[in-house]
Image (spheres, helix red, strand yellow):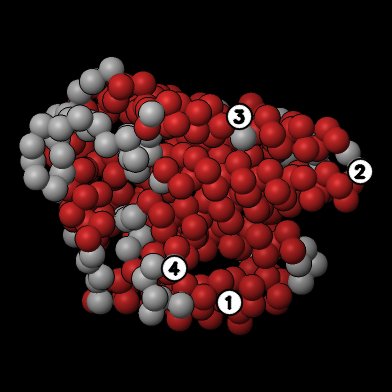
Amino acid sequence: MRLEILLTAAFFFGGSCLTGYALRRLLRLGQEGFLFSIVAGVMCWWALMEMILVPMTMALASFTGFVTVYTILVLGCVFAGCFCRKEILADAKQAAGAAREYITPGHAAAFGLILWQLYFIHHHMYLEWDDTYYVNLANEAVQSDLIYWIYPETGAIADFDKRYVLSLWPIFYAWLSKLTGILPTIMAHTVLPWLIIPLAGMVYELIGRRLFPKDRQLQGMFLAMAVLLHLFMSGEHIAGITFLSLTPWVGKGVLAGILIPSLFYWILRTAEAEERGLWILLGITCLGGCLLSSMGILLSPLFVGVTAGLAGIRKKSPQYLLKGALSCLPCVLLGIYYIYLTH
């Protein structure tokens, strides 16, 4: 299983990094580094899945058909990133030149805590009622070749559950399962934490760099504090942020622990420099949040709307609020469709 984890992580982080570089070139973003590219690439993968998965689910397409279409598009994004050699080499030279600066006591402590977090999940796995629905949803997709026609708790043919049909996060790790041959249950409980938890650490590191741009010590302390929050708040499983330490395969935990902090990071960036590419990345992240949970359809535009509104007031720029609203437009359209489905 160690080899499977290593190969899946190499594909996930390597592929998303190359996707991020292709996206950076398309959006004309400058030298941002490897972590920025990985996070941007993952958000692009999730947004792309949401765009494809919703219409294919509504059209009763097969899971195999979805895997084929989505894999071709993802590999196309990865292949496009292979042409960004200049950007990759420039970031590699910068990272190599500043390697000593990246090693601080705070970062070392955060790295150790992340390893403990993974150990905690492996040896003290918490399985709850969500597993009977979400993980079995991935199992049914692989076994029956139907995206959402099998009710996962009973195995019966059923109509769409309107609460979840627009936010089919389990299909993401069902897709990884199909590619690797690993059972979805094992993918969710054993492999996925090694993808999601390091990804969360990358997002918090980016936020720390933006909050404390001139102090690496404070950046490391911020990262360690963020990991500590996940570890020592996990006694109460109904708090969204703790799902990242308890059940990182549940979309609500990824939404609370990764997606919303990513939105916060993009808001910080756009507040400093209103680049068009950053606004597009903000919209891509909002759409990716819709895949994770039906709550993302509501929380993403709510969070972006409030923060963009406050930033617009501070900057005295109505255009800032307008751009924030446009970045949330995919979520709003999905929200309207969700209301239509439920009525």
Q: Residue 145: which disc?
A: none
Q: Secondary structure at mark 3?
A: helix
Mark 4 to mark 2: distance in Å?
Answer: 36 Å
Residue at 29%, 44% (x, y): give it: 170
- Can you say which quadrant of the picture contains the N terminus? bottom left
- Crowd rating for badge 4 (residues with CA inside 10 Å; few <14, some 14–19, many 20+): few
Mark 4 to mark 3: distance in Å?
Answer: 28 Å
Mark 1 to mark 2: distance in Å?
Answer: 33 Å
Q: Are marks 4 and 3 in contact (CB under 8 Å)?
A: no
Work out whether mark 4 precedes mark 2 in sequence or the reverse, and give the earlier one: 4
- Crowd rating for badge 2 (residues with CA inside 10 Å; few <14, some 14–19, many 20+): few
Q: Are marks 1 and 2 in contact (CB under 8 Å)?
A: no
Mark 3 to mark 1: distance in Å?
Answer: 34 Å
Work out whether mark 1 precedes mark 4 in sequence or the reverse, and give the earlier one: 1
Judge whether residue 211 can be spotted in this image.
Answer: yes
- Depth check: 248 or 129 in front? 129
Q: From the image, tell me which residue sits under label 3.
A: 329
Work out whether mark 2 precedes mark 3 in sequence or the reverse, and give the earlier one: 2
Q: Amino acid at mark 2?
A: Lys
Q: Amino acid at mark 4?
A: Ala
Q: Secondary structure at mark 1?
A: helix
Q: From the image, tell me which residue sits under label 2.
A: 316
Q: From the image, tell me which residue sits under label 1.
A: 225
Mark 1 to mark 4: distance in Å?
Answer: 17 Å
Task: Using residue 176 as the reference point, say whether residue 300 is left or right of it.
Answer: right
Residue 5: horizontal and vertical position, in percent?
Answer: 27, 56
Q: Residue 239: which disc?
A: 4
Indicate whether 277 appears above or below 243. above
